[in-house]
Amino acid sequence: MNILLLGSGGREHAMAHKIAQSAQCSHLYIAPGNAGTAAEGENVALDMMDFGAVGEFALHHHVEMVVVGPEAPLVAGIADHFAAIPALKHIMVIGPSKQGAMLEGSKDYAKAFMQRHKIPTARYQTFTIGTLSDGERFLDTLKAPYVLKADGLAAGKGVLIEPDLVTAKAHLREMLGGKFGDASASVVIEEYLDGIELSVFVLTDGSHYLLLPEAKDYKRIGEGDTGLNTGGMGSISPVPFADKAFMRKVEERIVKPTVRGLRDEKIDYCGFIFIGLMNCGGDPYVIEYNVRMGDPETESVFPRIKSDMVHLFEQTARGNLDGCTLEVDSRTAACVMMVAGGYPETYRKGDPIDLGRDDGTLVFHCGTKRDTEGRLLTAGGRVLCATALASTLPEALLKSYNRSQSIVWEGKYQRRDIGQDLLRMMQQG
Ligand code: AMP
Ligand code: GLY
């Protein structure tokens, strides 16, 4: 079948790489894609938020499946668009309905959903400018640090963790006053969860699910988890502390009630659920839902999936996931991100990249493009990542570091401590 993948980052390159390997894929289009996805299929210059144009393209190119990478088209209702138009109805869309996507599009909606289904999460309340003083009083009842979350999508910047009450109150006022525009017209205030973070991924047809490999993401720009938040500086899968007993708790207390909740509330959901959770002393608590795969988690999770992903997508779209199993590579995948100097603040684009020597390590493109002469150039903050698979974490790290160090451009930066916390944890048993 002809498949259209929407998105342009490292997540989409890792997905394109996997989809292109499927015997069921005859032609893969990526819109808009990057220089890496161009080697896996055909990039097309489409605006993925222009659903009319996406639908037209799908019709004219006999696309049978649309796989949606990022959240924005889902939150804006791309799956509903395809379902509502008779000529597009037959096309499978891998991604939830607009209502399902609210699990990511509105933190308040997600928290209320968790509360309705008794899914463990931090205690919270939601406030607007009209209830600012109630919000301040709620902050008084909590202990530092204080967690403030813009209700809507805020490009990953909408969560503030405040060390003291005075700053928390000041920032609450700023957020409700429009700091993140409409996204912070409502603000969720919640208890701080102290623990280690983990990303859990589920593929669901709305009734049944498959648990994909979990991963750990490194969000801060600086080594030792310091400095500004980024899209993610590396990822590791599997995660040593997510042992069988812990993952069983995740499945029983979080995954099953989540999927059951979607089904009971008749929310159309065919796609990924990414559960960001905190391991607090051995018990999992949900921090957030996302309605897509993670980036850079996909770059370590997808290379470990041995099953044919297109087959699984098809079964997902048909509501047949119950008969499916997932075959996973038991090796460890380590992904190290390389970014443009200055990222996540202002950075330069257009620097020529020397990709170094191919040693079999996967190199996924995140922000790259080719100029008219075919030279590879930087075109984003996160530029490339190197993912290596090996039987142990130290070996996987060594391979991905060796590969990433052979890649050169002016101003390139990468963290050198990805996975080191997990190694220390393993040594301490
Ligand atoms: P989010 O944008 O929801 O992913 O939040 C950004 C980051 O803030 C998360 O990845 C966590 O590291 C942190 N965070 C969010 N909520 C909490 C919480 N209740 N307790 C502790 N850390 C949190
Ligand atoms: N790596 C976190 C995210 O994709 O949101």
Image (cartoon, helix red, strand yellow):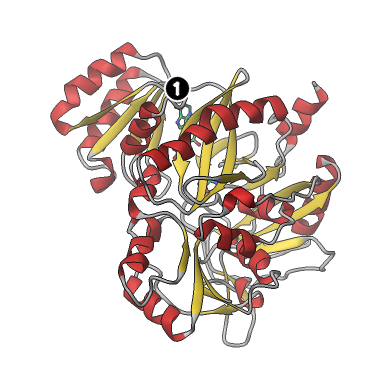
Q: Determine if residue 365 is in view.
A: no
- Residue 254 location, x and y as percent? 52, 31
- Residue ID at (64%, 67%): 19
- Residue 409 location, x and y as percent? 67, 65
Which of these two is toward me, 143 or 252? 252
The C terminus: image quadrant: top right
Which of these two is toward me, 8 or 108? 108
Q: Quadrant of residue 149?
A: top left
- Residue ID at (62%, 67%): 16
**Tag 1: amino acid:** Tyr
Is 305 drawn above or below residue 242 in the view shown? below
- Residue 377 location, x and y as percent? 60, 73
149 with respect to 339 (left or right): left
Is 339 drawn above or below residue 136 in the view shown? below
Is 200 drawn above or below residue 375 in the view shown? above
- Residue ID at (52%, 66%): 8
Is 296 drawn above or below residue 368 in the view shown? above
Which of these two is toward me, 332 or 205? 205
Q: What count of labels does the image hold?
A: 1
Q: Quadrant of residue 37?
A: bottom right
Q: Determine if residue 294 is in view.
A: yes
- Residue ID at (40%, 45%): 104
For disc 1, the neighbor class at 10 Å (few under 14, some 14 to 19, many from 20) is some
344 with respect to 359 (left or right): left
Q: Secondary structure at mark 1?
A: loop
Residue at the disc numbered 1: 192
- Residue 243 location, x and y as percent? 72, 29
Label 1 lies in ligand 1 vicinity (Cβ under 8 Å): yes
The N terminus: image quadrant: bottom right
User: Of all residues shown, which one is farthest toward the left?
Assistant: 130
21 with respect to 157 (left or right): right
